[in-house]
Amino acid sequence: MTTKCLVFVLALAASASAQTAKNDYSDPRNWLCLPGRQDACAVDQTATIVAGDGKLSREAWKADPAALIDCFYVYPTVSTDPGGNSDMNAGVEENGVVRVQLARFASQCRLFAPLYRQATLTALRAAATGNQITVDRTLSYNDVVDAWNSYLQRDNDGRGVVLIGHSQGSGVLTQLIRNEIDGKPVQSRLVSALLLGTNLPVPRGRDVGGAFENIPLCRAAKQVGCAIAYASFRSTVPPPENSRFGRVQGDNMMAACVNPAALSGGRGELRAYLAAGGQSITGSSSPPQPWVTPPQLIDTPFVTVPGLLFAECISNLKGSYLEVTVRGNPLDPRTDDITGDVMANGQVNATWGLHLIDVQLAMGNLVEIVREQAKVFNRGASPSRSRR
């Protein structure tokens, strides 16, 4: 081998080593959000309430700098970096997703959101066209484990913590809970796990087992140490045969569905906080429609629509999923529908359901649940016992 070739090979090896080297999560630059600083989570969450009669009113919001619990968040597949794994530089997509999925929780908890070398949206889109890009999912997972351990060592100080994830983030957190938390002493600090837009395995008819041995599904707002999981679909577009969500492998197993609008079961109203401009976090949604007719100026980043959206967990031959019903009234001036479907060539891609807005659909419900759980946890309640 010539000297030039050897130098080139060593340079490639050094580059590969740098890409897979451990991140230093004591470095604040490796976090999207940390308490007490102006970052991606320190953003306006003010909302406009759009009533059925078309009346608009403003809903104020503020963070609680003295919150007694923490929220540790892992974001979904959003990176448009060119490779199979993202780099550690936050782009508009990472900054944008915490704005719609995490920042509102700052009214209840301190926010921790690590950057991680996730499997990219680029790789996902390539796979859909038959062009595979190599992805190192172990790298993604190990990054989050390192961030979690750094958080425990440097920041937790025995505080209760809510784990929040969506899509890929939920998958990574499910693995972390199974390997690092379930049945271990640190489980006593788990306020709850919000594992949204994922297929969490649970034995049919039971609240525990499957993914976790000691962490049950949440069935009451005052229950702590439990998990909420669901994947949302329109009532008019249920999961098709090739659905990505609502089904899991294994005999007598089902995908967990916990309705954040009615934890004990049945139908409940979703308290959605939707982007006022209708944009999705990936730009794959249908164009927005005016919130009222005739259109009125909305100058807040979010909109909430009381009485428009309802949800119920459904389990049938199509799967187990959160069925979302839009109760529009053509006789009133408010919009009769919402955006959030994944679109492909101008058509709804039913295999994804309402995946783009899984979190936003129930944001108000989830924040209220965390509020109640924090009260219980900080009164010294012990984590939920497994119910078999």
Image: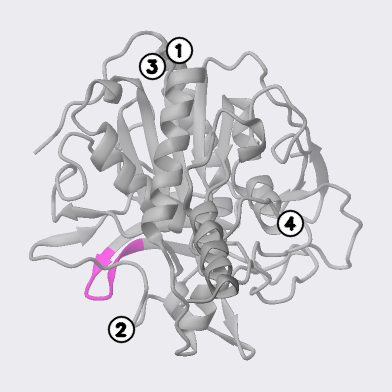
Q: Quadrant of residue 381?
A: top left
Q: In the drawing, does residue 268 fall left or right of residue 331?
A: left
**Stretch of the chain drawn in magenta:** 315-321
Q: Residue 312 location, x and y as percent?
A: 38, 56
Residue at image mark 4: 92
Label 1 crowding class (10 Å Cα cut-off): few <14, some 14-19, many 20+?
Answer: few
Amino acid type for the residue under numbered disc 2: Glu
Is-magenta flag for residue 8? no
Spatial CA span between label 2 and label 3:
41 Å
Q: In the drawing, does residue 349 fall left or right of residue 376?
A: right
Residue at image mark 1: 157
Q: Residue 149 location, x and y as percent?
A: 41, 29
Where is 229 relative to 221, above or below?
below
Comes first in the chain, label 2 or label 1: 1
Dot 1 falls on a residue whose secondary structure is loop
Q: Quadrant of residue 237?
A: bottom left
Residue at image mark 3: 377
Spatial CA span between label 4 and label 1:
32 Å
Spatial CA span between label 1 and label 3:
15 Å
Q: Are marks 2 and 3 in contact (CB under 8 Å)?
A: no
Is-magenta flag for residue 318? yes
Question: Going 41% across and 63% down the picture, which residue do you hit?
Answer: 136
Q: Residue 130 location, x and y as percent?
A: 45, 90
Disc 1 vs disc 3: which is toward the camera? 1
Amino acid type for the residue under numbered disc 1: Asp
Where is 82 relative to 78, above or below?
below
**Which residue appears farthest toward the front when viewing the image?**
2
Q: Residue 106 location, x and y as percent?
A: 63, 29
